[in-house]
Image: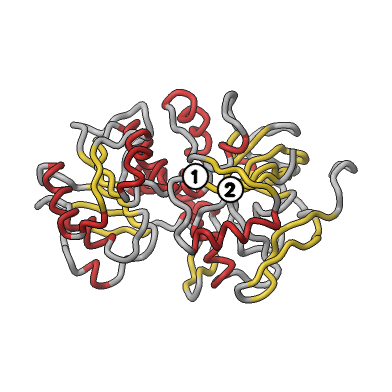
Amino acid sequence: MSTSIPKTMKALVQEDKKKASVKEIAVPALEPNDVLVKVQYTAQQNPTDWKHAAFLSPPGAILGCDFSGTVVALGTNLAVPLKVGDKVAGSVHGGLYPDKGSNAEYLRAESDLVFKVPEGLKLDEAATYGIGWGTACQTLVHSQGQQFPPAKVAGSPWLLIYGASSSVGLFAVELAKAMGYKVVAVCSPHSYDLVKSYGADELVDYHDGDAASAEIKRITGGTLERGLDTISEGSSFKIAIGGFGDKGGRLNAILPPPDEAKAIRKDIEIVNTLMYTIFGKPFKFGPNEIPANPKDREFAVEWLRRTPELITKFGIRSNPVVLRGGLEHVTEGWQEMKDGKVSGKKLVYKIAE
């Protein structure tokens, strides 16, 4: 490791249940396929960030997933030929390990699980292409058996995106349009203009409950067979499932469906997607033991390889950025998320120049 890299760094670390603070800890050592990234921006507004701190993270774990920054050191056997000085972005499995997390001055990441930031994309914007973008790719492409652009889905079918103003939702709207879908987006009216600007064809107010389902059916002519529920709580499953046509179909969700949701329609397959499977390692998620999934990791390598092209050629934009400063303020943003004060934007924290 270069002598210009310090031996210690500041990082937001889990202390005990429900408490995290900025501490001075060792700069992480690299495994053969790792690069060391000087973190310049860390992006929040993933519910998993504050939920890990509140419920899941063991003491000593570095928190945070999404990042952008500069490669400053290389492992001995990289899968992708990155160089010192490259600008990269992506996500790591924050909140689980004592030597891996984005809310830190330095992080280690596997070389084939980051993407090189293309010309014209600002680093604060690049930090938003983490969990939200990855989940959109996992659900709409990998899980639903489709292809990335330039391939198009046949017949321009309708796709439902529930929670379209969320981080996952905004990326999913853009990706779905690039794939050739017509998008019916469910969100709050105050987000209509934003979601429309990202490409949604039709908008439905989730506050309308059963009437929202009826409106989805009217818009799609009863043909809806595919959907993504980025909220997966409250009435979201009922509204989303109620919008499907008589042929049934497949609804992806970011949280496991309750039994009552599964019972609404037996002809609609509800598939839960947990983005952390992309890292190809077994892990514990609450009480559940999640096995390694090599296929999910293979797909992650592909979507990250394609990401610069999808940004530059297909116009996949970042989430709207609200820029803030300092690791010590990250937990304030988490509280705003818990209080429902963050919508249609991504909180991004500047860590270094």
Q: Is residue 156 left or right of residue 345?
A: left
Question: Which of the numbered marks, if any, corresponds to residue 207?
Answer: none
Q: Amino acid at mark 1?
A: Ala
Q: As displayed, is residue 76 above or below residue 336?
A: above
**Percent of width and height locating residue 85:** 74, 32
Whole-angstrom CA distance, mark 1 to mark 2, is 19 Å
Q: What secondary structure is found at the residue carrying circle 2? A: strand
Q: Are marks 1 and 2 in contact (CB under 8 Å)?
A: no
Q: What secondary structure is found at the residue carrying circle 1? A: helix
Q: Is residue 81 left or right of residue 316?
A: right
User: Around disc 2, counting alpha carbons within 10 Å, would you say few (fewer than 14), some (14 to 19), or many (20 or more)?
Assistant: many
Q: Residue at x 58, y 42 (%)?
A: 127
Q: Residue at x 41, y 43 (%)?
A: 137
Q: As displayed, is residue 153 above or below residue 260?
A: above
**Percent of width and height locating residue 134:** 47, 46
Single out the residue that lies furthest toward the front.
Answer: 190
Q: As displayed, is residue 96 above or below residue 103?
A: below
Q: Residue at x 63, y 41 (%)?
A: 68
| Count of numbered circles on the image | 2
- Name the residue nearer the viewer: 193 or 3: 193
Q: As displayed, is residue 55 above or below residue 67?
A: below
The residue carrying mark 2 is: 43
Q: Is residue 214 left or right of residue 172?
A: left
Colouring method of the image: secondary structure
Q: Amino acid at mark 2?
A: Ala
The residue carrying mark 1 is: 300
